[in-house]
Image (spheres, rainbow, N blue to C red):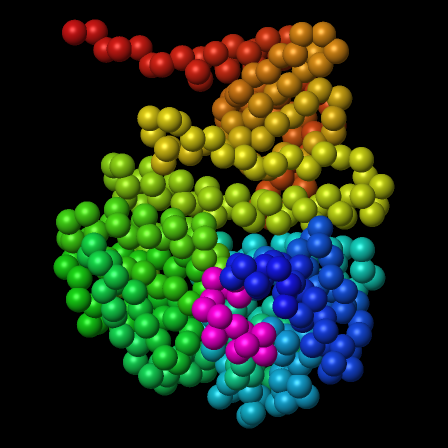
């Protein structure tokens, strides 16, 4: 027992990593290593991200942690029966249509670029926003994502696979709605796959709220909803979703969905709730860009590409903390990979009087977009190797000044 446990503090990420390494070694596998900088466990080309695992483990009650350790250990040392079968007759009863972000594998894809083998696609199709319907294979303690090559071996089409996976989801015990207060309800599913029930509009047939259901799945295992006619229900839903996506493990999606008779669709409200929703969406994408940045920095160092991977930053306002603006920086003389943000902070004349100009992205693209080189990144980044000329900087400063000036007051 270390000092953190003696003081009743949750275990650190390093503590958890070494617990899992010792468990793997006890099972006869000593090939896993801990990469503290990358917050991961690695074994050849297999990578397990520790950030979400540690968040889940640290937030769990002490009594629940041994079960979680068993689940994590199963991810490191899968049992023979935990392999995905290539026989469709055996597989079709164990597959489910899980909702996952297409961005969740961004770090793995970048890390895989130095491999001679192509990055293996998964059996999936787009859903809404950055969500995909991914075929998940249920092993009991864990769920693995089915590779496209395995689906091909099954000898049936992806549409047929998805249809069967939906049948399995419908066959699970009927989930129930539990009030969490302030006109917000949370879906409880004893069969698991909670967030995936968003795909089944019948889930909302017995929804107790007034008006059209509005739903969010901020994290895996979380489906929150309110009714469009519930007073202040949408504000409460968004505030709860923001807390969840910022602090709970396994962030999933910051979008809002409306469950209409025709199906599920993306929804953007009017007024102050639109600003709060936009903030949640930016917090969501900021975490994706952070993971992308870490992976790109390691990749660029490995291939000797001396480029700066810019941070996707967020700026708030004292009088409007929910009105978040995203920004990145582009410095003279520094080749940079720019994320797509609301504004770009241009920095130059570092040897003399430092100058900066915070320019809206649309204006920057109009004035100096000819320097932007598209890349293969998703979410997108543009590469810039040449800094704007002095006349172009003057135009950028004008655009920054106009953006910073308050709009003129209408004449009375």
- Residue 246 included in the magenta stretch of the image: no
Q: Which residues are magenta?
A: 54-71
With 113 as the anchor, is 322 left or right in this view? left
In this view, 16 is above or below 136: above
Residue 12, x across and y down, in percent: 60, 58
In front here: 366 or 268? 268
Count of marks, rendered view: 0
In this view, 74 is above or below 185: below
- At 33% from the left and 83% from the top, the residue drawn is 173
For the N terminus, which image quadrant? Answer: bottom right
- Residue 78 quadrant: bottom right
Residue 317, x across and y down, in percent: 39, 27
Prevailing SS of the magenta stretch: helix
- At 74% from the left and 26% from the top, the residue drawn is 334
With 192 as the anchor, is 71 left or right in this view? right
In front here: 49 or 86? 49
């Amino acid at each position: 027992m270390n000092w953190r446990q003696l003081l009743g503090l949750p275990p650190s990420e390093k503590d958890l990593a070494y617990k899992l390494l010792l468990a793997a070694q006890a099972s006869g596998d000593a090939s896993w290593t801990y990469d503290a900088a990358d917050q991961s466990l690695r074994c050849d080309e297999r990578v397990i991200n520790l950030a979400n695992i540690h968040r889940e483990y640290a937030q769990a009650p002490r009594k629940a942690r041994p079960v979680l350790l068993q689940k994590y250990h199963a991810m490191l040392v899968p049992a023979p029966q935990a392999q995905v079968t290539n026989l469709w007759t055996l597989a079709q009863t164990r597959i489910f249509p899980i909702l996952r972000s297409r961005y969740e594998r961004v770090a793995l894809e970048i890390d895989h670029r130095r491999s001679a083998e192509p990055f293996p696609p998964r059996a999936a199709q787009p859903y809404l926003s950055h969500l995909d319907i991914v075929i998940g294979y249920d092993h009991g303690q864990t769920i693995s994502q089915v590779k496209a090559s395995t689906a091909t071996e099954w000898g049936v089409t992806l549409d047929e696979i998805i249809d069967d996976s939906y049948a399995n989801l419908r066959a699970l015990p009927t989930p129930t709605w539990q009030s969490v207060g302030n006109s917000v309800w949370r879906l409880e599913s004893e069969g698991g796959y909670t967030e995936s029930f968003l795909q089944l509009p019948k889930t909302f047939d017995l929804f107790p709220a007034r008006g059209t259901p509005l739903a969010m799945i901020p994290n895996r295992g979380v489906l929150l909803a309110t009714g469009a006619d519930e007073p202040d229900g949408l504000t409460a839903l968004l505030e709860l979703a923001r807390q969840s996506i910022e602090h709970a493990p396994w962030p999933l999606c910051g979008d809002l969905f409306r469950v209409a008779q025709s199906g599920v669709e993306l929804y953007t409200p009017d007024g102050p709730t639109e600003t709060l929703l936009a903030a949640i969406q930016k917090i969501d994408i900021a975490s994706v860009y952070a993971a992308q940045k870490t992976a790109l920095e390691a990749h660029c160092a490995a291939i000797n590409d001396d480029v700066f991977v810019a941070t996707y930053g967020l700026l708030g306002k004292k009088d409007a903390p929910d009105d978040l603006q995203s920004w990145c920086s582009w410095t003279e003389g520094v080749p940079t990979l720019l994320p797509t943000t609301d504004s770009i902070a241009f920095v130059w004349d570092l040897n003399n009087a430092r100058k900066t100009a915070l320019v809206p992205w649309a204006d920057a693209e109009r004035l100096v977009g000819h320097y932007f080189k598209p890349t293969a990144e998703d979410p997108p980044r543009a590469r810039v190797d040449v800094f704007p000329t002095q006349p172009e900087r003057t135009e950028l400063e004008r655009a920054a000044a106009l953006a910073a000036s308050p709009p003129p007051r209408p004449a009375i």
